[in-house]
Image (cartoon, rainbow, N blue to C red):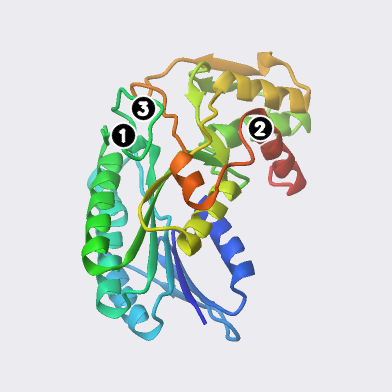
Amino acid sequence: MNNIYIFGFSGQDGKISFEVLSRKYKKSSFFLFNKDLLIIKKFNSIDKKINLSSNFEYINLISNLFQKFNPSLIFYFAAVHFSFEEKSLNQEKNKQEFTNYLLPIHILSECALLNKKTKFLYTSSSLIFSGSKIYPQDEMTERVPTCDYSNQKVMTEKILKSLGNKLGIDVYIAILYNHESIYRKEKFFTKKIISFLSKYKKQRINAKQDKILLYNKDSLIDMGYALDFVNGMVNLVLEGKPDSYIFSTQKPIKVKHFVDVVLEFYQLPISLVEFKESPSRSLYPLIGKNKKIFDEIGWKPEFYGEKLAKKLCNDFEKFNLI
């Protein structure tokens, strides 16, 4: 029986990975970490929840769990990315460093002590290329991070790969470009525009909110479907070789084009959307090459561009999430 650990369970990729893996491994035990909470779902036993109050307690608990329930597979989707305008800056920076950098390195160290056969996947971000002048990017493109978050991702990738090679542990780094689903939070522009237009169509919008504000209508976004990406990551861990891999569509879409498709889906006018310009997070477009992951396991995304926009609209309406 497998013991499968998923960190970042409350996020989009964590939720989808649990759905995918629980169907594949019906007789496994799952350890689901969600910020300050651990949910244990053991085969043929009652679910258990454990509250976590500090980083020290978090690390202590992981050490104890690994000894009792040796992990077969570990998926690390947890990430903290905040803006400098947020309150409690020092506290947030500590949380970011712990989640993005210290915790995954500790986890791999525990694997080295207890079970070198554990397979460990860590998710990085296309923002590691945000300062690069090269596009499209591939796995060999120089990492040029421009914020604490992307810098931590770069450092963690280097350390995990180095430790994995030295200790003989299979470490997979998934460099993820934009990927969307029904689980996206409201701040993401895909959820923001679809939610607004759906509510407007159903006459659930406050009279004061007669339009929605979006940014950078001409920006190109390399954007796919989260289920495609998660299936790819799971298959990589089960079938592929340990290394760094880019997950992208290679087929970017302009923000304005995406919005037009959603407007057409709901049969609403462009006058409902106001665009403004805002500083970009990267110097050049973040567009990834997915040739390496295709060569390794035959992965390629099914949904992108207009097809993705329509799929997201249908998903939101089908599951009545708006």
Q: Position of residue 58 (x, y in %)?
A: 32, 69
Q: Position of residue 152 (x, y in %)?
A: 26, 46
Residue 116 shows in the view: yes
Measured in 3D between alpha carbons, the distance from the residue under mark 2 to the one under mark 3, in whole angstroms, is 23 Å
Measured in 3D between alpha carbons, the distance from the residue under mark 3 to the one under mark 1, in whole angstroms, is 18 Å
- The residue type indicated by label 1 comes to Thr
- The residue type indicated by label 2 comes to Ala
Q: Residues within 10 Å of mark 2 (few under 14, many from 20)?
A: many
According to the image, label 3 marks what residue? 281
According to the image, label 1 marks what residue? 141
Residue at screen point 25% across, 77% down: 113
Q: Position of residue 50 (x, y in %)?
A: 43, 75
Q: Secondary structure at mark 1?
A: loop
Residue at screen point 69% across, 42% down: 322
Between residue 101 and residue 83, name the one nearer to us. 101
In the displayed structure, 285 sits above or below 177; it is: above
Residue at screen point 26% across, 33% down: 144
Residue 209 shows in the view: no
Q: Position of residue 6 (x, y in %)?
A: 46, 64
Between residue 138 and residue 97, name the one nearer to us. 138
Nearer the observer: mark 3 or 1; the answer is 1
Q: Residues within 10 Å of mark 3 (few under 14, many from 20)?
A: few
Q: Secondary structure at mark 3?
A: loop
According to the image, label 2 marks what residue? 309
Q: Could you tell whether 215 is left or right of 78 in the image? A: right
Mark 2 and mark 3 residues within 8 Å of each other at the beta carbon: no
As drawn, the residue found furthest toward the front would be: 295
